[in-house]
Image (cartoon, rainbow, N blue to C red):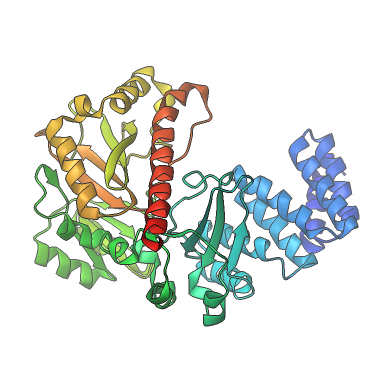
């Protein structure tokens, strides 16, 4: 039997008997012989964890793979951890996230239920505590990314997954200085809406990003929210469930082709498509998701052939430049724009960060300030492009925008502006707490 065939036989056996430590050790040896050292080390770690009866070690192994985007491997180790301990909450949590990414919404919900019905409040103590922040969270997607916005060295995180709340949980919440509503996607707030409203009726602590203000940023409500602000264009967006809904919305709004269609609740371009003709609309599989956003497509290509998308973050309604992505494709995302392939791209982004007024113009900056005021959120962001006449084409404006420091040396020029956002948000927290204490005394 060849080494490759022997390896295949071991992998098949592992799939049938995943909790056999001996099989994992045999696989470790086979992977090592094949020069696949990462997989060999993973199998050794799994064998040691099984021998020791240590489900947390298997959970940590799964998380290591999750952090580098190897979701299938992560799911395998999380499932094995749950074989040893079916009540391991963190494994259910992370496995639900992986299943969501893989499109298995039903299984993801099942694991979230198993996790959060057992425990829905999680406290992560700060090393040098300065603030205790109660973070209202949804169990699925749609939360504001708080890992870097609320650094864990000085902020004790009290995460409360509110759709699993009950009165006892609400009455027993740990002490906190303020509340941050991290349910930033208005499409994801419905499961916990009743619990949040019940909590807010008796909450005596300051609240950031009030849910009613977040709700106004839903894609099909944004044009109405920002209506009347000079110097911007917000394409019409309709929320539809089927072809008939889409045709009705197109007639009502007077939309023409091309049109953009995306699943409700998706971000980062997931599931986003462009329909260029009536025939494409009729061929589109609306049954792939419960509901969709249908919006007008606006050509925003620059004269040099590139497509540019800017992101600005609002902290306490004030705009801060965050990034510029420059792509050869109309669907622009920073990760896929190949920004590192051309020094001219990063140089242009650096100029925007250093002097956004010089890049966008005084009128555009006035428009951004007006948008920040109209959103009236303590933390939010906006993605937009610049049209040839100087107006801003608004793609989305909401609280879910990701901010994080860069680890690559070539992108280090961005980090002072990232720190400015973090520091501004920290200062807002301090002002809010001080103001609340002043009212009390």
Residue 227 at what x, y percent from top left?
12, 55
125 or 95: nearer the viewer = 125
Residue at the location (44% across, 29% down)? 415
In this rendering, the answer to whether 30 lies above or below 256 is above
Q: Quadrant of the C terminus?
A: bottom left
Residue at the location (38% across, 55% down)? 271
433 or 239: nearer the viewer = 433
Q: Quadrant of residue 89?
A: bottom right
Residue 314 at what x, y percent from top left?
31, 45
Residue at the location (46% across, 45% down)? 149
**Numbered marks: total:** 0
Q: Quadrant of the N terminus?
A: top right
Viewed as shown, does residue 199 lie left or right of 304?
right
Residue 2 can be seen, yes or no: no
Q: Quadrant of residue 36?
A: top right
44 or 1: nearer the viewer = 44
Viewed as shown, does residue 284 lie left or right of 424?
left
Q: Quadrant of residue 300?
A: top left
Residue 328 at what x, y percent from top left?
31, 31
Q: Residue furthest front?
A: 441
């Amino acid at each position: 039997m060849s080494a490759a065939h022997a390896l295949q036989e071991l992998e098949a056996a592992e799939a049938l008997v995943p909790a056999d430590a001996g099989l994992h050790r045999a696989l470790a040896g086979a992977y090592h012989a094949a020069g696949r050292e990462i997989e060999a080390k993973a199998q050794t770690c799994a064998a040691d964890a099984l021998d020791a009866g240590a489900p947390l070690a298997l959970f940590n192994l799964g998380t290591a793979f999750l952090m580098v985007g190897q979701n299938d491997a992560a799911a395998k180790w999380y499932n094995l951890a749950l074989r040893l301990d079916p009540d391991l909450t963190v494994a259910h949590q992370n496995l639900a996230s992986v299943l969501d990414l893989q499109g298995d919404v039903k299984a993801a919900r099942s694991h979230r239920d198993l996790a959060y019905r057992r425990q829905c409040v999680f406290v992560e103590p700060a090393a040098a505590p300065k603030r205790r922040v109660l973070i209202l969270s949804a169990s699925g997607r749609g939360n504001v990314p708080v890992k870097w916005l609320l650094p864990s060295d000085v902020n004790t995180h009290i995460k409360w997954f509110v759709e699993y709340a009950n009165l006892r949980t609400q009455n027993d919440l740990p002490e906190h200085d303020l509340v941050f509503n991290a349910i930033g996607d208005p499409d994801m707030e419905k499961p916990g809406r009743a619990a949040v409203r019940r909590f807010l009726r008796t909450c005596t602590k300051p609240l950031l990003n009030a849910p009613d203000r977040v709700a106004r940023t839903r894609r099909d409500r944004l044009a109405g929210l920002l209506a009347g602000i000079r110097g911007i264009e917000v394409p019409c967006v309709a929320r539809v469930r089927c072809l008939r809904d889409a045709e009705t919305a197109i007639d009502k709004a007077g939309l023409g082709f091309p049109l953009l269609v995306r699943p409700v609740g998706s971000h980062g371009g997931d599931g986003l498509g462009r329909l260029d003709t009536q025939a494409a609309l009729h061929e589109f599989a609306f049954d792939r998701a419960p509901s969709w956003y249908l919006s007008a497509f606006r050509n925003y290509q620059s004269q040099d052939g590139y497509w540019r998308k800017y992101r600005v973050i609002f902290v306490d309604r004030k705009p801060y430049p965050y990034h510029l992505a420059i792509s050869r494709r109309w669907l622009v995302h920073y990760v896929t724009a190949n920004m590192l392939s051309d020094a001219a791209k990063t140089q242009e982004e650096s100029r925007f960060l250093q002097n956004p007024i010089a890049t966008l113009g005084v009128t555009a900056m006035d428009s951004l300030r007006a948008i920040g005021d109209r959103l009236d959120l303590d933390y939010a962001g906006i993605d937009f492009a610049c049209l040839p006449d100087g107006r801003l084409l608004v793609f989305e404006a909401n609280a879910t925008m990701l901010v994080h420091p860069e680890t690559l040396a070539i992108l280090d020029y961005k980090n002072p502006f990232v720190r400015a956002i973090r520091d501004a948000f920290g200062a807002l927290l301090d002002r809010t707490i001080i103001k609340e204490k002043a009212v009390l005394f």
